[in-house]
Amino acid sequence: MFDRRQFLHTSLSTATAALLAPQFLLGAEKPTLKLASFRVDVSPPMDHPLCGGWIKPVVGMDDPEEAIGLVITGAGAPIVIVAVDWTGILNQAHQRWRQVLAQAAGTTPERVAVQCVHQHNALFVCLEAEQIVSAQKDLPHTVLVDFFEKSLEQTAHALSAAMKQLRPVTHIATGQAKVEKVAGNRRFLNEKGIVGDWRGSASKNPVHWELPEGLIDPWLKTVAFYDGETKLAACHYYATHPMSYYGDGRVSSDFVGLARKRRQAEEPNCAHLYFTGCSGNIAAGKYNNGTPEARVQLTERIYAGIVGSEQQLTKQAIESIVWQTENVLFTPRASFNETALMEQVLNKDAALANRIRPAMMLGWLRRCERKEPIVLSALHINSTTLLHLPAESFVEYQLRAQAAAPQRFVATAAYGDGGPWYIPPAEAYPQGGYEVSVAFSEPTVDAAMTGGLTKLATAQG
């Protein structure tokens, strides 16, 4: 299991490697890069818990969930970026993904970014919480650890195989297009300045359809990689909760995954990846009534955004590439107390979610006590930055990153290490609302997040 001594060792190793890296990392010489993609079906089997165990378990499958990744070599130690169609991968589970994939690629965990897409009829994995919950004989599992390990092992094998199929990558291209009638802000303040109305992923309330979109990022961004004229991979980024409906036990990559798969079928020789941006306060409830028909409509709109973004792609030869990380420590909520949280887990009169969630809170509290940091990372290629952030970060963080480096094309993927759950900006805490109630860190998380992402976004600016 990952511990702080290992973290310090690998951090020092990465820092040393950076000092010894070829000069092209500093932009002095044109790099010679190679790239390969890999994909694995990580759909949970029948009866597997979904969304941490407090919604209906798997009863069937509508379409498979995947882990899709890229590996890039030639810029120091290999770089690995993966998008996983799971709800979340938290704490030691996330550290384990990065460790195992790093070993498969011959790199260090700091050079591996694992981001979830955040569908809800999917796995939500906190290994510490599973240990706590499984000790209670009256509680269901939150995850079947054997399946978790099998999924990770298969992904590592696919990555190892991809390392033998690397192709030159010579060009990068960027483009963006507005997505129509998908995203809307979830939080609406009343005259007292607190959340008075809340709009989730789906709503059958006409009032929610009439409320404005509010603060969102309307742009779907694409970053594509080429070998000459051949498009090898395209990474798509958009900020919204990706659920049309869930809780029926049917495995699905939902509307964002269905749009990705449609585009993939059109370009079978190009790997298409979809990353969910900072969507802690963003969802589709303004335009989604939770019906199968709405899922079809949302799929079409995301697909149109992907195609529109790719139509705007502008290519340029790769001249420089840099991978950078920032380690940040968050302070757990002052209300978190080991004894009190354990009492909630043991309360047999409480709802299932109100017993499992405290186990995840305990996992986060213990992690913070061990001072194991969250790792933010960024891949800078020419004037493009691929930014990787943790958990359910609010859209404000994505917009801040873009504002910090207006001369760069900043594409943000959130839902990396899910340990902190929601990450609101400081000003959201006194406003209350659901997201603040399940934010596992104190408002000081804002300074740590903003400081870290600003350093990354402006490092090459």
Image (cartoon, helix red, strand yellow):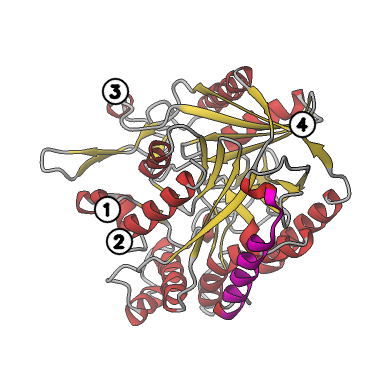
Q: Which of 234 and 276 is in front in this view?
A: 234
**CA separation in Å, label 4 and label 2:** 42 Å
Q: Name the residue under label 1.
A: 426
* Whole-percent x, y for residue 267 in the image: 77, 25
- Residue type (three-letter) at the residue carrying disc 2: Thr
* Whole-percent x, y for residue 205 in the image: 32, 30
Camera-side mark, 3 or 4: 4
- Residue type (three-letter) at the residue carrying disc 3: Glu
Q: Mark 2 points at which residue?
A: 444
Q: Mark 3 points at which residue?
A: 210
Q: Do the residues labelled 1 and 2 touch (CB within 8 Å)?
A: yes
Residue in view at x 72 percent, y 57 percent: 77
What's the magenta bit mostly, secondary-structure-wise? Answer: helix
Up-down: is 154 above or below 128?
above
**CA separation in Å, label 3 and label 2:** 34 Å
Q: Which residues fall within the magenta stretch?
A: 5-23
Quarter holding residue 57: bottom right
**CA separation in Å, label 1 and label 4:** 41 Å
- Residue type (three-letter) at the residue carrying disc 1: Ala
Camera-side mark, 1 or 3: 1
Q: Callout 1: helix, strand or loop? A: helix
Q: Do the residues labelled 3 and 4 touch (CB within 8 Å)?
A: no
Which one is earlier in the sequence, the residue at label 3 or at label 2? 3
Mark 4 neighbour density, 10 Å: few (under 14) some (14–19) many (20 or more): some
Q: Do the residues labelled 4 and 2 touch (CB within 8 Å)?
A: no
- Residue type (three-letter) at the residue carrying disc 4: Cys
**CA separation in Å, label 3 and label 4:** 39 Å
